[in-house]
Amino acid sequence: SQKIEQNSEALNIQEGKTATLTCNYTNYSPAYLQWYRQDPGRGPVFLLLIRENEKEKRKERLKVTFDTTLKQSLFHITASQPADSATYLCANSSGGSYIPTFGRGTSLIVHP
Amino acid sequence: DVKVTQSSRYLVKRTGEKVFLECVQDMDHENMFWYRQDPGLGLRLIYFSYDVKMKEKGDIPEGYSVSREKKERFSLILESASTNQTSMYLCASSQPGTGPHEQYFGPGTRLTVT
């Protein structure tokens, strides 16, 4: 079955730097990869989606890449701010399924 | 604006009690989901529903049941609560179609079973 792997260790960075989070998947290439943000004690909030035929997607300070050769998606936050501190979840879904498989998330901590 | 609400933010129940968690969405979505989230385990799908009165088991349905009598409402039932069901419960909805389906989550219910 498909597995989604995210780094379980928290990522600590300095304000203003670019944060890069990694999502690796096994087996087949998913049709879509989604990224969500989750604040403590809250439900995840959808951020971005990238299709398998897209290499890159941007939204304001956010950028997602999708490398089917490496079986990996990278999530970048440029000019990071302390308010970006949260857990970021990656989720995949294949073309025929509306049920995504979620990774366990990576915690991002941006220090002022 | 899209909205998914859950009946309680915090709930404390005793072992053996019957527990109802309710979820309501106002987006006219056809798909609704119940997850539980535990530290180190991530989001795990309990049940989902793709239409009124329809339900499908997710990855961890044991000890749970669901009910969907109206399109906007999806209830999770713990028939006899146990301490290992202490968790954060998250409801989500999405709209099916030919494209991808981002999920909209509720704020979560933190359930403690003592």
Image: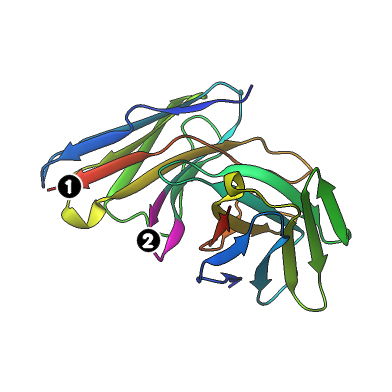
Q: Quadrant of residue A33?
A: bottom right
Give yes or no for residue A91 being in the magenta stretch.
no
Q: Looking at the picture, which amino acid does disc 1 mark?
A: Val
Q: Which residues are magenta?
A: B36-43
Measuring from the top left, give residue A48's x and y in whole percent.
Answer: 73, 47
Q: Main secondary structure of the magenta part?
A: strand
The span from disc 2 to disc 1 (Cα, nearest Å) is 17 Å
Up-down relation of residue A94 to residue B75 (above or below): below
Q: Which residue is identified by label 1?
A: B113
Up-down relation of residue A24 to residue A64 (above or below): below
Measuring from the top left, give residue B41's x and y in whole percent.
Answer: 41, 64
Split into 4 quadrants, where in the image is the N terminus of chain A? Answer: bottom right
Q: Chain of mark 1?
A: B
Measuring from the top left, give residue B108's x and y in whole percent.
Answer: 40, 38
Task: Determine the secondary structure under disc 2.
Answer: loop
Measuring from the top left, give residue A22's x and y in whole percent.
Answer: 67, 68
Callout 2 crowding tier (Cα within 10 Å): few <14, some 14–19, many ≥20: few
**Residue A97 visible in the shown view:** no
